[in-house]
């Protein structure tokens, strides 16, 4: 199976180099790797090509988000006959057996759209971050399965999942072409869950493959608890709910309930004097109701 690997970089050249080093150690050939440099300042291409001269680099003038960056990369890749797309966070490192195990998982059945590995936090030991996602179809809320559990062999069997963790996903090209791209208005967060729900609605399967593993430096682009991250998650959970909850009153009732839950979270943060995070949640709700998407608040919240 011919596989292309796609990374999106935004002002994290050192992390991207570490990721590329792990791919090199795993035997991934440089010409099958695409790095989308998402408006980094300074541009990352000189440093990346200095170490890995044969990789493909697409330099974008502005930050198009994780969604836009990946979409640009996939469009470039699919001009060639690649059968699968390995979407990998640039703040992750792969284990040597990761890609062969994912390929085996994807080839196990033609109805499998995508597979994802066991994801560990990038710390000593084996603390799990994700073995896939469970999705509450009513609220749109996602639960990271296995999160913050030590790996003691409890997730050693491949399993179908409602959604996969976007840190590392091997996607069948035919499935991507049928289902479509990431929804770019998300900008960042929830895009992989939205894609997975669309895949399942189209009859495809999503599978967790424990024989593959990566280590992830979580939320390194924004910070694990940054106000911008809080804003994007709150806003995008509402968009996720609206896009995947059918039509009519059922859709709006669910959105109202999710908005109310987030509003209560905002008041809880306010009582704990976490003003910036409370504001970020309320702005997320406000912008959703006014139909705002993309990087509307990026400049404002990055200064906080």
Image: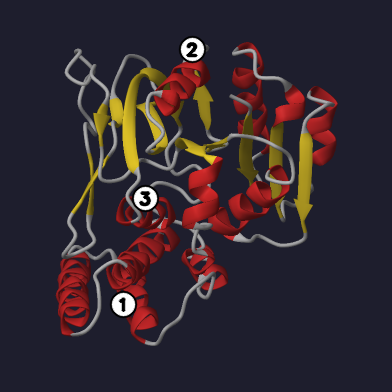
**Alpha-carbon distance for marks 1 and 3?**
23 Å
Task: Identify which residue is drawn at 34% across, 70% down.
Answer: 243
Q: In the depicted view, which residue is nearer to us: 30 or 290?
A: 30
Q: Which residue is mark 3?
A: 196
Task: Identify which residue is drawn at 35% across, 45% down.
Answer: 204
Looking at the figure, which quarter contains the N terminus? top right
- Name the mark nearer the viewer: 2 or 1: 2
Q: Earlier in the sequence, mark 2 or mark 3?
A: 2
In this picture, residue 218 sits left or right of residue 53? left
How dense is the environment of label 1, judged by Cα within 10 Å: few (below 14), some, or many (20 and up)? many
Q: Position of residue 195 (x, y in %)?
A: 41, 54
Q: Earlier in the sequence, mark 1 or mark 3?
A: 3
- Name the mark nearer the viewer: 2 or 3: 3
- Whether residue 215 is visible, yes or no, is yes
Give the numbered dot on residue 97.
Answer: 2
Q: Position of residue 301 (x, y in %)?
A: 48, 68
Give the numbered dot on residue 285.
Answer: 1
Could you say which quadrant of the image residue 228 lies in?
A: bottom left
Q: Position of residue 151 (x, y in %)?
A: 23, 17
């Amino acid at each position: 199976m011919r596989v292309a690997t796609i990374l999106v970089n935004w002002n994290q050249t050192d992390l991207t180099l570490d990721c590329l080093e792990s791919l090199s150690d795993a035997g991934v050939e440089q010409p099958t790797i695409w790095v989308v440099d998402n408006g980094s300042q300074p541009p990352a291409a000189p440093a990346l090509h200095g170490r890995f001269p044969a990789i493909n680099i697409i330099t974008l003038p502005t930050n198009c988000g994780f969604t836009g960056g990946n979409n640009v990369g996939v469009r470039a890749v699919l001009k060639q006959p690649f059968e699968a797309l390995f979407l990998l966070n640039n703040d992750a490192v792969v284990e040597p057996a990761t890609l062969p195990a994912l390929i085996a998982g994807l080839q196990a059945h033609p109805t499998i759209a995508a597979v994802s590995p066991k994801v560990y936090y990038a710390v000593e030991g084996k603390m799990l971050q994700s073995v896939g996602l469970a999705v509450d179809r009513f609220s749109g809320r996602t639960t990271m399965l296995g999160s913050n559990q030590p790996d003691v062999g409890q997730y050693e069997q491949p399993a179908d999942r409602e959604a996969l963790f976007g840190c590392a996903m091997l996607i069948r090209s035919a499935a991507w072409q049928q289902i479509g791209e990431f929804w770019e208005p998300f900008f960042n967060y929830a895009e992989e869950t939205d894609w997975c729900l669309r895949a399942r609605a189209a009859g495809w399967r999503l599978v967790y493959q424990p024989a593959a593993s990566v280590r992830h430096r979580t939320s390194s682009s924004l910070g694990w608890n940054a106000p911008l991250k809080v804003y994007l998650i709150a806003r995008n959970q509402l968009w996720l709910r609206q896009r995947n909850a059918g039509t009519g009153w059922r859709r709006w009732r669910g959105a109202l309930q999710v908005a109310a839950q987030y509003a209560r979270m905002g008041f809880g943060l306010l009582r704990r004097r976490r003003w910036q995070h409370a504001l970020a949640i309320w702005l997320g709700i406000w912008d959703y109701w006014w139909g705002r998407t993309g990087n509307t608040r990026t400049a404002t919240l990055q200064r906080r």
